[in-house]
Image (cartoon, coloured by chain):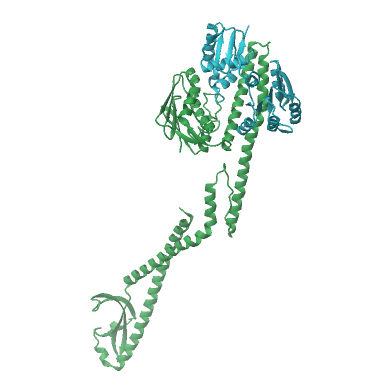
Amino acid sequence: MKLLNYTTSYLAGILLAVILVWAAIFYFNMLDEIYDSMDDGLGNQKILVIQKAARDSTVFARRDFEDGYYRLKEISFAQAQHRKDVYQDTLMYMLNEQDYEPIRMLTTVFRHQNRFYELRVITSMVEEDDLIEDLLFALLWLYLGLIASILVLNNILLKRIWQPFYKLLQRLQEFRLEEPSQLVAEPTEVTEFQLLNSTIEKLLQKNIETYTSQKVFIENAAHELQTPLAISLNKLELLAEGQNLQEDQLTQIGAVMQNLERLTRLNKSLLLLSKIENKQFGPVEEVNINEAVQKVVSDFADQATYRNLTIQVQETAICRQQLNPDLALILIINLVKNAIMHNVPGGSVNISIDKNSFVIQNSGKAEPLNDHKLFNRFYKNTDSPGSTGLGLAIAKAIADLYQFRITYEYQQLHQIAVYFN
Amino acid sequence: MKILVIEDEPDMLDNIVSSLRKEQYVVEEAANYHEALDKIGAYDYDCILLDINLPGGNGLHLLADLKKNKKSDGVIIVSARNSLDDKVAGLELGADDYLAKPFHIAELHARVKSVLRRRIFEGSNLIQIQNLTLDPDKHQVWVNNQELTLNRKEYDILLYLVTNKGRLVSKTALAEHVWGDYIDEADNFEFIYSQIKNLRKKLKDHHAAVEIGAIYGIGYKLTSP
């Protein structure tokens, strides 16, 4: 839910509660005031009728309301005793409405020439149900009006106020550590936003610096390792050429050389990775993937034969892609090598090339691999200690560089697919 | 045959120089840019091994200087930078080859010999060992003037071993040279063995006077009695 709508929904709830409570209090207060003023009117009329009765005896003939607003009835002393003025709500048939309508009635007793009379004075009254209905409608319109104005206010005013925040958010979303673009903050007068902008700017700058120095470190470390590795390897080769060595000494030298060579390969792979990530590869050309695959497959034919593997290539279309030819070859080599190395004797490698995809399947361990970690650096299968654990990371880096999609799936066979755009 | 090695790392220089001297080349050394500039100016060499990162200057400037003075010395760039730009720049400036550190001694010899062959013999450069003859340009092999038919890989292996005759060639060096740099250490390069086996059989069937010996755990060595 967006921040603006979030506050609006809270406001709507609170407003509803406040307006309902307010409406109840208002309703009862108003009703009270109406009764009060009606009762005052009735009290006044009572006095007027009694004064009129003293002057005009026809008043006593009013036995019913008929054309007036009062009636008189003679009562006995006993009935008159201990009577107080009573105000009450009652119903009366109204000719104009043709219905019983509520009225307010004052019943009182007075004495005239030692005779006691009961006097009833009436006045028409508010219809409560109508009042409630009117009030409800009025409040509903008020409520809707308020919500509408809040929405308008939010969308025009708050949106403008929060604009630096949303701009920052959008920039952060587009920000990539691998290719940092200068994050220019929107100038703002709000202190909190200024603080947010400067904090994020600092944070990102720090991140970029760390990332860059790490990248440079890996690159430099790999470069610096080349020369000592070269010296050590060559010294061992010269030593092994010596005449007076026993077979077990040669075996030892061979083992050391193998490990140094492994280190060399690891080093080269790391350099390759940072070169790919630094985009230090030459121009993009149109590469015929089919031809590249055929070349790689023939290069690896001896390894496949040695491991008793069958490699099948199925081409349904010619796949031409725009990328650096060296990287295209490295991508395919790494995937083919991976399929051969992590296979079982007598297994198979199936490659299919479509107009926009390259899919390679291989037999191997009969369980799916962790597809989240598979493309990570140094993710290794324990039963292949010789591998550098960088082959698929390199493949992924190349795919990422050109925005190709690379996926892993397991259905009896391990399958890695590259979907070109 | 005169070779100049320009390299600032003393151990590296020592390795290259002692290994080349075993092959009876006349080897001179330069450990920095100015020393190298002096030697290049004063003498002609058949082959120069040139490191790019030198104290006192960039090796590529030396190369440019050589070409400017129309010197015909063969140049192999040896660099730890392994950068494509260096390689492209070096080859564009007229270097004959590019070798990235770390490299195998066998590979160094193969490159040096290849440059020397192209420079000195200019075409007619058959390699002869006893009764075995190789033509590196036409990819042909003869034993006692009778042609030996080899597949591409067998031929590449034989040429590499012949170039490094009497020297131990590691399986890795052989695999990287014949199968390409990207071949991995899968199966410890045991797959090479089947090609070696075929090659040995063909040589033996034709009574070639050379032998491919295996040095356990490391690699192979071509010897002639």
**Residue A76 in the image, given as x and y percentages of width and height:** 27, 85
**Residue A338 in the image, given as x and y percentages of width and height:** 50, 26
Please state if A318 lies on the left or on the right of A58 as rendered: right
Can residue A330 be seen in the rendering of this structure? yes
Can residue B191 be seen in the rendering of this structure? no
Q: Farthest residue toward the bottom? A: A55
Quarter of the image with the C terminus of chain A is: top left
Q: Residue at x 50, y 59 (%)?
A: A159
User: Is residue A193 shown above or below A347?
Assistant: below
**Which chain is the one coloured green?**
A
Between A21 and A109, the one nearer to me in the picture: A21
Number of marks present in the image shown? 0
Q: Residue at x 33, y 85 (%)?
A: A46
**Residue A34 in the image, given as x and y percentages of width and height:** 37, 77
Between A189 and B9, the one nearer to me in the picture: B9
Between A168 and A126, the one nearer to me in the picture: A168
Figure quadrant of residue A283: top right
Figure quadrant of residue A188: bottom right
Q: Residue at x 43, y 35 (%)?
A: A356
User: Is residue A36 shown above or below A314?
Assistant: below
**Residue A203 in the image, given as x and y percentages of width and height:** 61, 47
Between A103 and A407, the one nearer to me in the picture: A407
Tell me the shade of chain B.
cyan
